[in-house]
Structures are given as structure tokens and as C-alpha cells.
Amino acid sequence: MPPLTRRNNLARVLDLTPAPALPPAATDFAKPLRIALVTEYYYPHLGGICEHVHFFAREARRRGHHVDIITSNIEGAVAEPHVIRIGHSQPIYFNGSQARMTLGWNLKKQLKETFKRGDYDIVHVHSPLSPWLPVIAIDAADCPVVGTFHTYFDKSNLYGLTRKWLQRKLDRMAAAVAVSHSTTVALNRYFEANWTIVPNGIDLDLFNPHVPPPPGIRKDVPVILFLGRFDPRNGLTTLIDSFKKIKGTKREVQLLVVGDGPLRNHYYRAAGGDPDITFVGAVLGSRPSYYAHSSIYACPTTKASFGITLLESMACETPVVCSDILGFRDVVKHEREALMFPCGDVDALSDDLVRLLDDETLRARLGKTGRHHAQEYGWPNVTAAILDVYMGVLGPSKVLG
């Protein structure tokens, strides 16, 4: 596998508005590429992989390339141009969270037929060693395959049992991309590859500090924001306990919880009917408004490959308090854009929140630095980095001389 170029990164909110054409990319190809993006995760499922796929596809199309997204059928999905669905998406519990797996007859045959019709130059598989659609696509492709890995994990029984078989799949790929250093740390426990790091990206026009306020947000008290799926690893119970400790000092403050999931009743009970804890539910297009009009974004997540919500908050100039975990260290530094506390430590989280609530100057400094740092992760930069990987895979014959 040849050495490849490294650049920058992010991921975001669904926006199907057509974007204006861009000038040619830093990487110029002899003709527009035909790209297939294969993913278990796409809308209406919400998550970082969906948004990475969607916004890379949008940016690549703006640069003149043809991009098809190949995924599975999921409840609530609607027909969209250049989105090809095969098989059926089944939710499963995997790696401490809810995952998805595509089921169906003759998936490999369907993929081969789809790839043949598409006449693609590149098949780009996301989470390529996950069952079943991505890993099948590696064998079904009739052109070079690039794989992007998105997940950090401490241990994987699946990888432990199937590592030799999966290593052969990994060896078939022309390039192996990871969204962060922490992702490579996890993968190196089981596999060998020449990793290229191209992190996630962010829409800096959408996520900015000047968006209008959302409904339900208070203006008379400081607002602490939680935004994420109701998943144990996202640490909402830790934040609720810390918030109750802060309120015990008779401080006026609101905790705004944006998100949803099967565990909603568990977190409602944890909140105990506190009138200063507001559950908004799941949101999509209004996410930037919640970041921009909150005093602090609190992210007590216990496990992450990359801090995408940290970047979203930073782009909106909102200071961050987050767990000190490997995936977040790839994005923020303590005292630069964020205050970082030991993972799961209720008292330390409370102390950092109080410190920021009491120090408007510190909040402003962290917010300004965050917005500046987030500029590196704009989707044009990320897309150019991925196209550089394609250039390294396809070689001089596809590149303008």
C-alpha cells in the first residue's frame, strides 16, 4: 500500500439544499470521478457516519464528481437521487451501543450488479469491517476500494474471533483511512495497516455564532447544553447528577437536553421532574441554534472516536466542558477550547461547570479560540484530503499532468 497524503477533517446536520459550484479542487483529475460510498448508516438514521457520508458526497459533487450512496432500506427512508438502497437495515446492540446490520438475500450479487451499472472509479466503504454490507462490498467491488474507519473501542470480541479473516479484507483495500488517532489505537490491537488520518468535517456556514435562538431556551439564566443520543456512553446521568449538585448551591441555571432514544424514560426519572431540566427531544436542522445560544456545551461522553459535537459547539463559539478521553484529545486541548475533566467524575464536572459559569472572560476566550480552530475542519478541506487519498490510489493516469 503506497504512502498517502494526510490532511484535515469533521461531520453534521442534514441539509439537502443544492450548493453552488466550487472552483476546481486542489487535486485535479483528468476527468470527473465516479464514486460509490457504501455505508450501513444513512438517513433517516442519525449519527456521525451518516453526516460524514452526506457532506462529503455534497462537496465532491460540487467539485464535479459523480457520487452514489449505497446503503440499506431503513424504516422512514424516502427515495433520493443518487441514493441506492439494497437489503434491509436491522438494529443490533454492538460495541456498547446500538448499531445496524444489513440483511437480505444475495447481497453480494446485488452489490456486484450495482457496481457494474455504476462503472465506478472508486468504491469507498465506511466502517468497512462491519457486518454485513460494508465487508461484502470489499469483495464485490471491481475497482479500487478505500475504507474509512470511524469507531473507537476498548475491546472487540468479533474482531478477536475473526481477525485473520478480516485482516485479509483489510489487505484488499487500496487505502485505509481513520477519522482520528484514537481510532487507529483501537484498530492496531487487532490489525495491521498503513493508516491515513482524515478526520470528520463541519459546515462552518451552518454552525456559526449568529444563528437565531431556538424555542424553549431561557434568556434570563445561563444555559448548560447536552446534545446527543440517549446512549449510556454519552454520560447524561453524570451530567444530571452534576447539575443537581450545582443547583444545590441555589444557583439559577438551566440544563437543556437535546436528544432522544429508547432510554428516555430512564433519564426522565433521573431528572426527577426538576423544572430547570428541559428535555427538547431530537432535533436536526436547529442544532446550531442550541449550541450558539447556550452558555456551555457539556459533553460527558465516556467513549468516542472523534469529538464531532465538540467541533459543532466550537464553530458556534460556545465553550466546551468535556470528558478527558482519547477521542476528544484529538480535537481539543484543556484550557484552549475546553475544560476537560476525568471521565465519569461528577464532582470534577460540577467544578468545571461552576468555573465557567462564574467566569465570562474565560467563556469568551474558549469560544473565540474554538471557532478559530474549527476553521481547519471545514468540508472543503476534508473533501480535498479524501480526494488526495483517491489520487494516491488511482495514480498518475487519473490526474491532470
Image: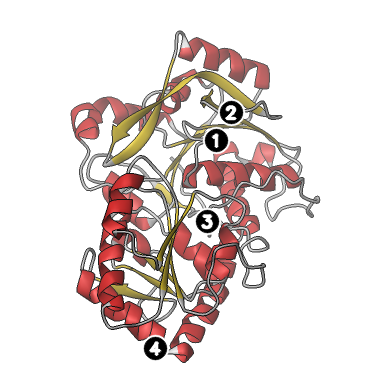
Counting residues from the start of the chain, the first of labels 1 and 2 encountered is 1
CB-based contact (under 8 Å), mark 3 and mark 1: no
According to the picture, the residue beneath numbered tag 2 turns out to be: 77
Report the Cα–Cα distance between label 2 and label 3.
24 Å
Tag in front: 4 or 1? 4
According to the picture, the residue beneath numbered tag 4 turns out to be: 358
Report the Cα–Cα distance between label 3 and label 1.
20 Å
Residue 44 marker: 1
Amino acid residing under circle 3: Leu
Q: Quadrant of residue 348?
A: bottom left
Instruction: Residue 165 in the image: state x and y as whole percent.
Output: 28, 25
Label 2: how many Cα within 10 Å (few below 14, some 14–19, many 20+): few
48 shown above or below 110: below
CB-based contact (under 8 Å), mark 2 and mark 3: no
* Label 3: element kind: loop
CB-based contact (under 8 Å), mark 1 and mark 2: yes
Residue depicted at 28% across the width and 70% down the height? 244
